[in-house]
Every structure is written in C-alpha cells, then in structure tokens.
Image (tube, rainbow, N blue to C red):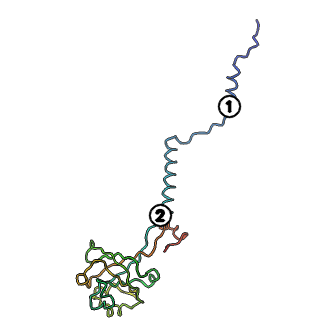
Amino acid sequence: MLIPNHPIFRQNAVKHYMQSREKDTLPRFISLPIALFLWGLLGLLLVVGLLAWYEQIPTYATGQGAVLSPRYMSHYAQQGAVAAAFFAIDQAKYLHVGQRVAVSFTSSSDNSLKGTVLAVDAAVSPDSALSHYGLSSTSALSITQPSVVVIIKLDAVSPSLYAGSTLTANVQVGSRRIISLLPGIGSFWGEENT
C-alpha cells in the first residue's frame, strides 16, 4: 500500500487554526447592553459636571425693613415710595447705589415688587433706627443688632398705600458656581464671585 504524500489538512486550514490560537481572548464580564448603559451614564455625569462648573447662580444679601412714611423721608420725597432695609454689617461691602432689589411684604406672600438702592447709610443701632426712621414696634423687632441701612426706591408704588408695611429686601450681590454648593468643594473654588 502506498502512502500518499499529501497532507490531510489543507494549508489554509492549518494557518487559520494557528492564528486563532495566537489571539488573546478576553473574558466577557458584562453584557453589551450593560456596557453601553454604563458608558452613557459616564457621559451624562461628565455633561452634568461641566454644567455645574460653568453655570452660575446669583447670591443675595437679605435684609428686613419697612416702607417709610412721608414725614420720615424728607431727603427722598421726590422719589415716591421709599423703604429702609437693615442688613448685617458684614454685608455692607456688597451693597452699592443703583443695585436692583426684590422686595416682598411680610403681610402677603404674593405681593412682590422691584426697587433700586438709593443710598447705603452708616451702621445704626436698633434704638437709633427706631427713632430716626419712625419704625413701628413690629418693624423694630426685626433689628436685633447694629445694621447697615439701605434706602430703597420702590417702583410703581404709592407711598401712602404701603407706609409702615414690613418687608424683606433681597439685593443681588454676586454669583457663584453651582459646583461650589457641593459640600467640601465650595472651599476649593471660593464661596462668592462678585
């Protein structure tokens, strides 16, 4: 019996077999849909992080006060309705003439007005604020420490209609990055950007 000199396997089949053995095959730990979901989640996290880094929100100085009656606003009589708001002394460096003010009255939550800072006066004690600005006892209760007085011109308000009404004044004094609101991160990038 003659033994043929031809190999049993074709040359291409042997070559293909050897190449497949040389390839590294990695184990598959997670399925394809889960991998795609995790990549999408990472992308979403990056987008939210960028928005929190670049977007800014306003910061406000808040003070309590009252609308002045006509007899106590002799310097500002031609301005229309004028209010005096009392802010903490440490906020004085952020308050300037011409800033816009959002005013809401404590008697009604839906009555909100806009105004402009006319003057920033020196710090006054609670007793001198009571006598100098003619505040009612209710308005004077909100002043518990020496305060900076901000005179506010109220837009489109009759002085006699709101005279003596207590109010809350919010003055936008700057802005800060959203990311600075996260605990521990705010100290790295500073608290305020005025």
Q: Amino acid at mark 1?
A: Arg
Residue at 36% across, 77% down: 101
The CA span between labels 1 and 2 is: 54 Å
Question: In terms of secondary structure, where does tag 2 sit?
Answer: loop
- For label 1, the residue is 21
Mark with earlier residue (1, 2): 1
Work out which quarter of the rendered image holds the N terminus and state it. Answer: top right
Residue 85: where, in percent of width, then height? 35, 83
Residue 18: where, in percent of width, then height? 70, 28
| Mark 2 surroundings within 10 Å by alpha-carbon count, few (fewer than 14), some (14 through 19), many (20 or more) | few
Name the residue nearer the viewer: 167 or 7. 167
Q: Which mark is on residue 55?
A: 2
Against 46, residue 86 (above or below) is below
Residue at 76% across, 7% down: 2
Q: Which mark is on residue 7?
A: none
Q: Is residue 40 left or right of residue 120?
A: right
Q: Quadrant of residue 91?
A: bottom left
Q: Is residue 152 left or right of residue 58?
A: left
Q: Amino acid at mark 2?
A: Glu
| Mark 1 surroundings within 10 Å by alpha-carbon count, few (fewer than 14), some (14 through 19), many (20 or more) | few
